[in-house]
């Protein structure tokens, strides 16, 4: 349910920027990273009927090809920059390894794409600040997917603890199916 809420929120924000007149526009997205989270988001997107998955990118060609066929995308590639260069793609879902988030995020912003990025945003505070500065004033939407931020207890902590803050916490979750 959290993923559906987050995706609907992202979709609504993208539609506000893209829709002209009464025509309903389905944002076209690409999934970068075809592992567990890439497939998880693909399953959720397919349930919504408000997006069109146009492409998959993964350094593992077999994984990208599998997702492309499984979710009826138009194409797949091994280099994520191809989907960033695609003028038909409105937004990208970054579901790659943590060490690639910063580079892909900066490149996606530079390419004018809306971004949904799996956590973490980046591996260093300096990289997080760079992404924040890169997105400012662009009109693009950039969202980090962290399901816990929508939990009532986390919202309460956030309301009580003012910015700036650093909180070190540990979350326990059941193992997700492969």
Image: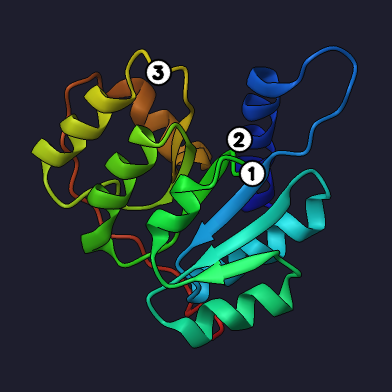
Q: Earlier in the sequence, mark 2 or mark 3?
A: 2
Rendered image quadrant of residue 90: top right
N-terminal of the pair, mark 3 or mark 1, is 1
Residue 10 badge:
2
Identify which residue is drawn at 62% across, 83% down: 66
Would residue 42 appear left or right of 87 to someone viewing this image? right
Q: Which residue was labeled with disc 3?
A: 138
Describe residue 62's horizontal placement relative to residue 11 as left or right.
left
- Decide: marks 2, 1 in contact (CB < 8 A)? yes
Q: Residues within 10 Å of mark 1 (few under 14, many from 20)?
A: many
Mark 3 crowdedness (10 Å alpha carbons): few <14, some 14-19, many ≥20: few
Helix, strand, or loop for circle 1? helix
Say if 3 sits above or below 152 in the image: below
Query: Which residue is more in the foreground, 67 or 166?
Result: 67
Residue 93 is at least partly visible in this image: yes
Q: Residue at x 60, y 35 (%)?
A: 10
Q: Identify the residue at image location x=9%, y=37%.
A: 126
Q: Which residue is mark 1?
A: 7
Whole-number angstrom distance, CA of label 2 to CA of label 3? 16 Å
Q: Which mark is residue 99?
A: none
- Please say if 5 is above or below 38: above
Q: Secondary structure at mark 3?
A: loop
Where residue 104 appears, x then y in whole percent? 31, 51
């Amino acid at each position: 349910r959290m993923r559906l809420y987050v995706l609907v929120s992202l979709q609504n924000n993208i539609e506000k920027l893209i829709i002209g007149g009464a025509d309903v526009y389905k944002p076209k997205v690409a999934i970068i990273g075809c592992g567990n989270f890439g497939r998880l988001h693909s399953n959720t997107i397919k349930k919504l009927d408000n997006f069109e998955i146009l492409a998959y990118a993964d350094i593992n060609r077999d994984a990208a090809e599998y997702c492309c066929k499984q979710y009826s995308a138009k194409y797949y590639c091994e280099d994520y920059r191809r989907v960033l260069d695609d003028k038909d793609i409105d937004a990208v879902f970054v579901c790659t390894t943590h060490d690639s988030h910063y580079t892909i995020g900066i490149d996606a912003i530079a390419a004018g794409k809306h971004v949904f990025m799996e956590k973490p945003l980046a591996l260093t505070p300096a990289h997080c600040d760079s992404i924040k500065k890169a997105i400012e004033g662009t009109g693009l939407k950039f969202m980090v997917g962290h399901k816990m931020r929508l939990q009532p207890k986390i919202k309460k902590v956030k309301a009580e603890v003012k910015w700036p803050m650093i909180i070190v916490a540990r979350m326990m979750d059941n193992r997700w199916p492969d």
